[in-house]
Each structure stands twice: as structure tokens, then as C-alpha cells.
Amino acid sequence: MEFCEREIKAAQSNQETKYTAIALDILKEIKEERQKLQEEIEARLTVVKGIDPQDPRTWTETMINNSYERMAAADRWELDTPMPFEEFKEKLFSDKDFARSNAPRGKMDQNDYNPWRT
């Protein structure tokens, strides 16, 4: 705490201590980590580009499979039994609201997508 108080007082008076550069480097690393995390969160919330979220005909098989895996992971987390894949797929193509809520986001267009990391 004393260290922080000294650094704050030095910064307020436009002075530096022998630890100022270290403190600034640590703060820079923290800021960069937060920025990367924010970008990752935004990417995971953004619908995959080039598709219509309401029309699964514009999705690849990988996207459909990963959408199902994400839904199934969420159900398992809640200790529910996920609907069978064929039922999921049928509902995707018949219910635009269901399709939109299960539209591929983030890295769901990739074969190595892991629904447990989202």
C-alpha cells in the first residue's frame, strides 16, 4: 500500500520514482490483457460474417454442428438433457427465431470450436 501511495503522489506531482517504469509496464500489460479479453468477448457475441442468422441454409455443416454443441453444452451445464441433433436441425430450418437464437457466433465456423470455452 505504501508503494502505491508513493507512486500516486509522484504521478500527481509529475515525478518518477525508481519503480515508476515497472509500475507503468505492469499497468500497460493489464490494459492489453483487458483489451484482448474484450475483443474475445465481442468476437464470441458477434454472428459469423457472411451468414443470415435466420436462415441455416447459409450456414456450413460445421456451423450447424457447433451450434448444436453449444446448445447441448448449455443444457448439460443446467443438468438438462439436450434435444437430439436431428430434432435441433429440423427446428433450425422451421423456426426463424430458434435459428436466430442459435446462430453461429465467434469461432463457431471452425472445426476446433469448443463450446465449453464460451
Image (cartoon, rainbow, N blue to C red):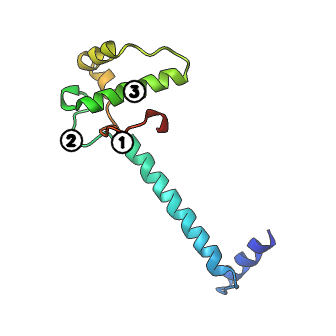
Q: Which three-letter amino acid code belongs to the residue tagged 2?
A: Gly
* Mark pair 2, 1: CA separation: 12 Å
Q: Which three-letter amino acid code belongs to the residue tagged 3?
A: Glu
User: Could you tell me which residue is drawn at 32 percent across and 34 percent down?
Assistant: 104
User: Could you tell me which residue is drawn at 47 percent across and 26 percent down?
Assistant: 73
Q: Which residue is mark 3?
A: 69
Q: Which residue is mark 2?
A: 50
Residue 38 lies left or right of residue 6; in this view the side is: left
* Mark pair 1, 3: CA separation: 14 Å
Place of residue 30 in the rendered image (x, y in percent of width and height, measured from the top left): 57, 63
Which of the two discs, 2 and 1, labels the residue nearer the N terminus? 2
Choose between 55 and 8: the one closer to the eye: 55
**Mark 3 surroundings: few (<14), some (14-19) or many (≥20) residues within 10 A:** some
User: Could you tell me which residue is drawn at 64 percent across and 85 percent down?
Assistant: 14
User: Could you tell me which residue is drawn at 70 percent across and 85 percent down?
Assistant: 17
**Mark 1 surroundings: few (<14), some (14-19) or many (≥20) residues within 10 A:** some
Q: Can you say which quadrant of the picture contains the N terminus?
A: bottom right
Front of the two marks 1 and 3:
3
Residue 42's label in the rendered image is: none
Q: Which residue is mark 1?
A: 106
* Mark pair 3, 2: CA separation: 21 Å
Q: Is residue 55 visible?
A: no
Placement of 80 over or under 57, stated as above or below? above
Residue 69 lies left or right of residue 94; in this view the side is: right
**Mark 2 surroundings: few (<14), some (14-19) or many (≥20) residues within 10 A:** few
